[in-house]
């Protein structure tokens, strides 16, 4: 494996809009809202940004193609900007592009933006989209909850779990995230719920009920990245958050067509996690990592993911969840900001919104949610279907020099 | 007796069966008298079934029985097929995986389209020709029309050729333009004339005439007929007619009115199939078709029938449906609001469909010659992570392979005209894995490990352009 990018790039500013049903704002306003916070935080001038990336998933009913809408909304000084899209990992993909540009030395300061305006669709849930001219001819007309619900039946079958136990663990996941989200003023959903409510909610895609599904929200988040040397040059003293690993893995058709995959886990997540740990120099993730922001698009995804990230043993995630291991006061807090469950999933923004929480936690700026002295955190995005997806695993933490 | 005739027979009846009481109850405010007719059930297509899909199921089952490997011609008979100008027989031929050198033909326009096509095949085919005939109908009577209580949806298929299970003796036909009902391309529903007139002037005049003509020609005494297949909805009319024609000793075949309803031009063959399931060798069957005249075909079962009966499927029990609105919606007589998700554009990229039609129509995957992995779709590079060989795949047809549910969901959010949309990963016994929609499962019937079998069904309907496309879905195994 290559030497990777560990500690080659630091995050010097971040911003995140209020997430929610932002009937008051379009993608342009959401981007500006996140950007204003970000550039103030970074303490630089707009003119110092040398390149930008914009992550947007649904271009058809959002800002359209290219990153020109960002350049225009932020009135950027004609710098190179590019749109990126990689399913639910789109936000992280934007950060990856900016980080790589800085790590490569192609530019000193770069902007990673992610935005999604979902609530102009006219209906609940994610918008309908084509899967491709050939795929539309044969793949089921699946939705996101229906696709991820596949995890539940396959996971229960593999581990010989009855669905009631799995439902209980799923309810715990959602209950825990609502507890956390209630402390976050930027979250879409800021109410706590009872586990019973989650268990008895109307069915969306069996066995996922309403509370097993994340919200559908509008939002934007962004980061300004540079080298640690440039950060020092800009006068950034004290806590500096650097990127330890940014790994991505994409399906190649095996999970869709080969019997070697049993449907109960994300093959790509296991690969991305392994590579991220290697890049970050982590040998025991459960011991070395302090907090997790994982892709809880659906409660069951979070359960499966904890095994894929090697922080729960195979078949044990359900029990770890029920034992409170991932609660805010547990051994490994997960979704301390409320997660996708409470922020919803404006797709282009999500990955950056997760990094934003780690960034606040590292700086001790997470207010009521603040964990004690976190050093290393992980974010995870899983986009597509369990059998055809892209997964990113990012690790960020305190910068302690080379 | 000739060594030529019907060599295989199969049917396909939709799993959904509407209770006739549901129809009567729905129309009680307008026609309380319907209650008297509200007996039994009638089969109706699910929202992903139509005459094509039923035809493919029946055709496929028929070919599985047939040990004659080369089918030279395929005829499709229907009065309710979805296209006016696009040959259905060609599509069906691809779906049942016939060679592209097969001659294909659609026949239509009469309730005797099925029997007329069979008659012609039996009379005109050379004795060494193997021909597949499939009749399939799913008519749409106007809501409240008495035909709603009578019609059913269904298909039947027969192969004709040498070494038959029912040998061809003789056939006769009469063509008379008696318009008991009609439908033009502009009209979705039949315009129907009085039943009593049709009975007195049509059935009771024309049928005895054609039967006499046939028996005279074949020099067969009426009282030696063992089975009379008379596709009439009224059993009293049928009984009286049999008597009038001197067929008192013949067993009047069950018209299946309480199980399937009268399945349009497929019905004579559906009834014939049910007779063949239990007929003994050396029995004489008189098969009748009625519509703008009549067809009469005389068959005699052979010793071979007995061996084949174990391979022939009877009508499954089906799923009882009490909801009249579900029936109406499936017949597109009730314009349900399916929400904004139903606005998705289902335009078909026709050039893609054409390139990939072996995958889509025939459910052909690939089998890697290097590692033997069976996979769908077929690709240049093998999907096996331990293989990955280039250009090693041979065609492998998945449509008759057994499989089981690996994971599933019942999705109430996804657009479906038969909610919830059910789909998941399917594990074939041969090793292939395919993400498929499930069909014919009611809510709560799916589970990991349930045995499934592929069925050709409607995949999407393009409401904007009137096109519909088909693909294979996983249905409960062991049902025809």
Image (tube, coloured by chain):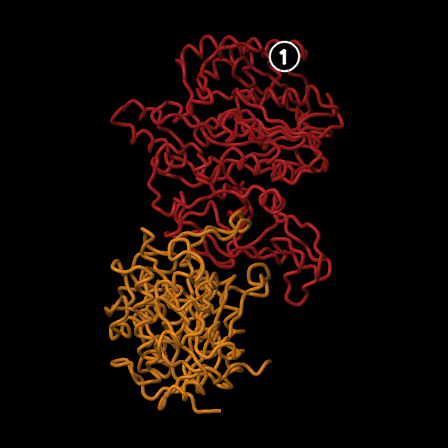
Chain colours: A orange, B red
In the picture, the quarter occupied by the C terminus of chain B is top right
**Left or right placement of residue B409 versus residue A329 in this view:** right
For the residue pair A270 and B291, the one nearer the viewer reads as A270
Where, by quadrant of the figure, is residue A188 drawn?
bottom left
Q: Which residue is mark 1?
A: B214
In the picture, the quarter occupied by the N terminus of chain B is top right
**x and y, in percent, of residue A96 in the image:** 47, 73
10 Å crowding of disc 1: few (<14), some (14-19), many (20+): many
> With respect to residue B18, does B79 lie above or below?
above
Q: At 73% across and 58% down in the image, what residue appears?
A: B369
Q: At 60% across and 80% down in the image, what residue appears?
A: A1
> With respect to residue B199, does A126 lie above or below?
below
**x and y, in percent, of residue B391 in the image:** 71, 57
**Left or right placement of residue A200 versus residue B395 in this view:** left
Q: Look at the image and tell me whether residue A78 can be seen.
A: yes
For the residue pair B364 and B18, the one nearer the viewer reads as B364
Chain letter, disc 1 residue: B
Q: Look at the image and tell me whether residue A166 can be seen.
A: no
Q: At 36% across and 38% down in the image, what residue appears?
A: B326
Where, by quadrant of the figure, is residue B159 drawn?
top right
């Amino acid at each position: 494996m290559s030497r990777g990018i560990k500690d080659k790039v630091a995050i010097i500013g971040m911003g995140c809009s209020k997430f929610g049903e932002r009937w008051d704002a379009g993608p342009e306003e959401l981007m500006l809202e996140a950007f204003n916070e970000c550039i103030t935080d970074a303490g630089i001038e707009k003119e110092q940004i040398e390149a930008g990336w914009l992550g947007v998933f649904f271009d058809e009913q959002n800002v359209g193609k290219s990153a020109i809408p960002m350049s225009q909304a932020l009135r950027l000084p004609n710098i190179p900007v590019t749109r990126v899209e990689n399913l639910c990992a789109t936000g992280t993909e934007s950060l990856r592009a900016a980080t790589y540009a800085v790590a490569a030395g192609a530019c000193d300061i770069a902007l990673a933006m992610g935005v999604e305006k979902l609530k102009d669709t006219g209906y609940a849930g994610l918008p309908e989209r084509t899967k491709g001219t050939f795929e539309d001819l044969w793949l089921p007309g699946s939705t996101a909850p229906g696709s991820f619900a596949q995890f539940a039946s396959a996971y229960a079958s593999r581990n010989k779990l009855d669905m009631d136990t799995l439902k209980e663990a799923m309810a715990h996941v959602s209950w825990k995230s609502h507890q956390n989200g209630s402390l976050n003023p930027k979250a879409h959903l800021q109410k706590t719920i009872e586990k019973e409510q989650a268990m008895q909610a109307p069915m969306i895609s069996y066995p996922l009920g309403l509370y097993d599904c994340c919200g559908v929200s509008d939002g934007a988040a962004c980061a300004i990245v540079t080298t640690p040397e440039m950060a020092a040059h800009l006068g950034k003293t004290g806590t500096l958050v650097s990127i330890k690993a940014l790994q991505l893995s994409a399906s190649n058709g095996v999970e869709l067509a080969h019997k070697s995959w049993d449907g109960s886990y994300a093959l790509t997540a296991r690969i991305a996690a392994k590579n991220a740990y290697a890049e970050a120099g982590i040998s025991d993730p459960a011991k070395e990592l302090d907090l997790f922001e994982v892709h809880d698009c659906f409660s069951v995804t979070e359960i499966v993911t904890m095994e894929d990230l090697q922080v729960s043993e195979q078949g044990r995630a359900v029990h770890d969840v029920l034992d409170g291991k991932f609660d805010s006061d547990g051994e490994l807090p997960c979704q301390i900001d409320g997660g996708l469950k409470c922020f919803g999933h404006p797709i282009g923004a999500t990955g950056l919104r997760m990094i934003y929480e780690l960034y606040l936690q590292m700086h001790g700026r997470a207010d009521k949610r603040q964990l004690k002295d976190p050093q290393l955190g992980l974010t995870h995005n899983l986009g597509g279907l369990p059998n055809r997806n892209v997964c990113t695993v990012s690790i960020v933490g305190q910068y302690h020099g080379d | 007796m000739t060594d030529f005739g019907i060599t295989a027979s199969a049917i396909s009846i939709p799993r959904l069966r509407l209770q006739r009481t549901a129809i009567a109850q729905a129309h009680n405010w307008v026609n309380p008298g319907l209650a008297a007719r509200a007996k039994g059930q009638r089969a109706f297509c699910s929202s992903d079934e139509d005459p094509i899909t039923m035809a493919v199921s029946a055709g496929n089952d028929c070919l599985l029985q047939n040990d004659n490997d080369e089918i030279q011609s395929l005829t499709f008979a229907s009065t309710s097929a979805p296209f006016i100008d696009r040959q259905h027989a060609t599509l069906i031929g691809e779906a049942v995986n016939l060679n592209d050198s097969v001659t294909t033909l659609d026949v239509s326009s009469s309730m005797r389209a099925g029997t007329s096509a069979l008659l012609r095949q039996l009379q005109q085919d050379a004795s060494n020709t193997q021909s597949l005939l499939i009749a399939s109908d799913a008519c749409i009577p106007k809501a409240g029309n008495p035909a709603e209580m009578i019609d059913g949806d269904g298909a039947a298929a027969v192969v004709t050729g040498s070494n038959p299970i029912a040998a061809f003796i003789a056939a006769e036909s009469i063509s008379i333009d008696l318009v008991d009902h009609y439908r033009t391309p502009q009209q979705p529903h039949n315009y129907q004339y009085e039943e009593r007139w049709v009975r007195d002037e049509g059935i009771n005049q024309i049928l005895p005439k054609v039967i006499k003509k046939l028996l005279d020609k074949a020099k067969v005494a009426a009282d030696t007929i063992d089975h009379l297949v008379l596709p009439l909805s009224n059993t009293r009319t049928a009984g009286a007619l049999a008597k009038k024609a001197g067929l008192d000793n013949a067993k009047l075949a069950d018209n299946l009115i309480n199980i399937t309803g009268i399945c349009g031009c497929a019905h004579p063959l559906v009834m014939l199939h049910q007779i063949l399931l239990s007929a003994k060798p050396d029995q004489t069957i008189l098969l009748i078709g009625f519509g703008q005249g009549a067809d009469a075909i005389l068959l005699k079962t052979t010793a071979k029938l007995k061996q084949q009966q174990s391979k022939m499927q009877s009508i499954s029990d089906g799923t009882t449906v009490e909801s009249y609105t579900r029936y109406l919606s499936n017949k597109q007589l009730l314009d349900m609001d399916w929400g904004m998700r139903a606005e998705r554009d289902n335009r078909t990229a026709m050039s893609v469909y054409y390139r990939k039609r072996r995958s889509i129509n025939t459910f052909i995957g690939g089998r890697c010659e290097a590692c033997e992995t069976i996979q769908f779709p077929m690709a240049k590079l093998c999907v096996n992570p331990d293989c990955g060989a280039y250009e090693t795949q041979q065609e492998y047809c998945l449509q008759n392979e057994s499989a089981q549910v690996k994971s599933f969901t019942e999705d109430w959010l996804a657009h479906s005209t038969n909610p919830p949309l059910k789909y998941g990963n399917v594990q074939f016994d041969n090793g292939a894995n395919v993400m498929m929609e499930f069909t014919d499962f009611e809510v709560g019937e799916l589970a990991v490990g349930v045995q499934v079998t592929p069925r050709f069904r409607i995949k999407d309907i393009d409401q904007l352009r009137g096109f519909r496309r088909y693909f294979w879905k996983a249905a409960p195994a062991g049902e025809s």
